[in-house]
Amino acid sequence: MIIVTGAAGFIGSCLISFLNQNQYNDIVAVDDFDRPEKENNLKGKTISEKVNRDDFHEWVQAKHMHIQFIFHLGARTDTTEFDTSIFDRLNLTYSKKVWNNCVEYGIPLVYASSAATYGEGELGYDDDEAKINSLKPLNPYGDSKNEFDKWCFKQNKAPYFWCGLKFFNVYGPNEYHKGRMASVIWHAYKQIKQSGKMKLFRSHRTDFKDGEQLRDFIYVKDLCNVCLFLLHHRKNSGIYNLGSGEARTFNDLVLAVFKSLQLDASIDYIDIPQDIRNTYQYYTQANMNKLKKIGYSQSFTSLENGVEDYVQQYLMKESYY
């Protein structure tokens, strides 16, 4: 069986669907399952069992001999949350228990790290493990992800295969429940449908024009493809970037949404809210050479094609992946 934590969330539910499509049907879904707005994410998927997040570690002790692989995607991902105790409990303590279970029972592990660990990118966006101790994330969420990455390398014992994936800006279906933390594509679609316009953040730096802030956007289906590759690969443990490898502007993204809706573009620029202005990233781009060097050869979906698929096949139809 394959374990997916954070199973009812955006990425976790997409991974389960992708695994089902590739004939993996013995899947155990782990989450807190207490948010009704996330229930549709798992409808229609083939799942062997649902396990409450708080019961998972005890469950592993009883069922470990049947576990083939763990994808640990469950985490608190709110970049505007500043209560560090929440991240300590859900992103650090919990993840350490998952790691230790994998060590004890010989289970391979892939877990979600984050590009938020790179902070302002002053050290670049290379998944060089020698730089992890020097990274300076901009918020408690990024700190929690980086602290766990650092903790992994300090351990005397590790799963026989483990991999931390630094997700960049992931977008795609099944994020209806995320609200403010949903992708810019989701927000753009909602705004354009309601008003015919899109609001983007104005630049507060002289070296970037309005809407020309750059991000590495990765379609969630590409992320799932990488996870499937690692499920089979099971060697070359370590930290890996997971983005498209190409930075694109928010203007590019919004224009792709307008085009997918067959509408003329209309963009208004607004100030970045004060509560995130000092921690706002103006540029991210994953160096993907490390993953390619271990044999990953699939191409990544272009922003235009990913947005078109997401908008026309999911948002416009209010459907799930």
Image (cartoon, rainbow, N blue to C red):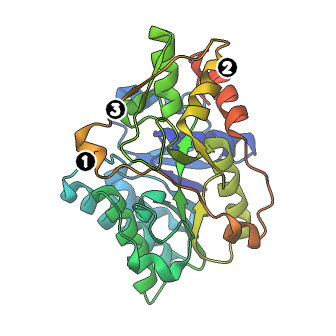
Nearest the camera: 94 or 179?
179
Say what amino acid the circle numbered 3 marks.
Answer: Arg
Residue at (35% x, 69% y) in the render: 136
State the residue at coordinates (75%, 72%).
Answer: 293
Q: Check disc 2 and report the residue beneath it.
A: 259
Residue farthest to the front, as pictured: 206
As measured in the structure, the alpha-carbon distance from the residue carrying label 2 to the one carrying label 1 is: 34 Å
As drawn, is 61 to the left or to the right of 23?
A: left
Residue 302, image x, y percentages: 72, 41
Q: Is residue 241 visible?
A: yes
Relative depth, front residue between 10 and 116: 116
Q: Which residue is mark 3?
A: 35
Q: Earlier in the sequence, mark 2 or mark 3?
A: 3
The amino acid type, in three-letter code, at marker 2 is: Lys
Circle 1 crowding by C-alpha within 10 Å: few under 14, some 14–19, many from 20: few
Q: Position of residue 151 (x, y in %)?
A: 38, 78
Q: Secondary structure at mark 2?
A: helix
Mark 1 — residue? 81
The secondary element bearing badge 3 is classed as loop
| Residue 83 horizontal/vertical position (percent) | 18, 53
In this rendering, the answer to whether 124 lies above or below 263 is: below
In terms of secondary structure, where does tag 1 sit? loop
- The CA distance from mark 2 to mark 3 is 34 Å
